[in-house]
Every structure is written in C-alpha cells, then in structure tokens.
Image (spheres, rainbow, N blue to C red):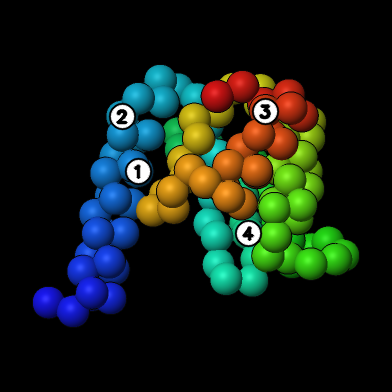
Amino acid sequence: MKAQKRISIRRRRRGFRVHNRVRRDRSGRARLSVFRSNKHIYAQVIDDESGRTVAAASTTEGDGPGGNCEAAKAVGQRVAERAIEAGIKEVAFDRGKFGYHGRVASLADAAREAGLSF
C-alpha cells in the first residue's frame, strides 16, 4: 500500500474514532467542531439535539491571512464570543481527524481564554 493511501486511511479512521468519542461523552453539551484546510480554518458550535449550528466563525470572513496560528486564535475568540452570546458556555471539543497541534490547538486555547469551557 502506498504511503499516501495509508495516511489517508489512518486520518479517516481517526476522524471516526474522535467523532464517536465526542458524541458519546458530550453529556448534553453542544459540540465545537473544527475543520482545517490548507488555506483556512473553520469552527462551529453545533447543538446536536436540535440539529442546528448555534455559532460559527472562519478565516474567510475576516481580514488578513487565513492559514496561520494568529488567524486561528482570532477564529477561536470570535466563535467563543458568538457562542456565549447565544447562551452556550460549555462545549465538547471535536477536532475531527486533525491532531491537537498547531492551528487547532491555537483555536482551542483562544476559545478557552474567551470564556468557553471544555
């Protein structure tokens, strides 16, 4: 099996594992879901019980660069402020298939500093 295919399969399995763990252990809390592309990072707070997005933020809506840690911090702060305005202070962090490192970790730290608890 080629290395790229092996990496792709491993990422997909990690995504399934993380999503299942977050959905099982969230105990009624909303879910802070993160998606990272090569250029941008997206975050949304999802209420799975009602099936709707409560708050969302991404680097596509702001000025400046979209693919670095500073931009991820800004997104984390923005999504936390919007979630708190909507009345949600506790979330379950769903990093998906992405490792808790770099931009994903920066977004999570900024959301915690802005007042979200997870």
Secondary structure, mark 3, is helix
Quadrant for residue 24, please give it: top left
Q: Which residue is mark 1?
A: 19
Instruction: State the separation of the CA atoms marked 4 and 3.
Output: 17 Å
**Residue 9 located left or right of residue 87:** left
Instruction: State the separation of the CA atoms marked 2 and 1.
Output: 9 Å
Quadrant where the C terminus is found in the figure: top right
Residue 73 horizontal/vertical position (percent): 73, 45
Type of amino acid at the residue the image marks with label 2:
Arg
Which of pointers 3 and 1 indicates the residue nearer the eye? 3
* For marks 2 and 1 on the same chain, the one whose residue lies earlier in the sequence: 1
* For marks 4 and 2 on the same chain, the one whose residue lies earlier in the sequence: 2
Residue 48 horizontal/vertical position (percent): 46, 38
Asked whether disc 3 touches disc 1, contact meaning CB atoms under 8 Å apart, the reply is no
Residue 42 shows in this picture: yes
Number of numbered tags placed on the structure image: 4
Q: Which residue is mark 2?
A: 24
* For marks 3 and 1 on the same chain, the one whose residue lies earlier in the sequence: 1
Q: Which residue is mark 4?
A: 41
Instruction: State the separation of the CA atoms marked 4 and 2.
Output: 25 Å
Residue 62 horizontal/vertical position (percent): 83, 61
Residue 57 shows in this picture: no
**Residue 53 located left or right of residue 23:** right
* For marks 1 and 4 on the same chain, the one whose residue lies earlier in the sequence: 1
Q: Dot 4, how many residues are within 10 Å of its Cα: few (below 14), some (14-19), or many (20+)?
A: many
Secondary structure, mark 2, is helix
Type of amino acid at the residue the image marks with label 4:
Ile
Instruction: State the separation of the CA atoms marked 2 and 3.
Output: 22 Å
Q: Residue at x 61, y 51 (%)?
A: 103
Which of pointers 2 and 3 indicates the residue nearer the eye? 3
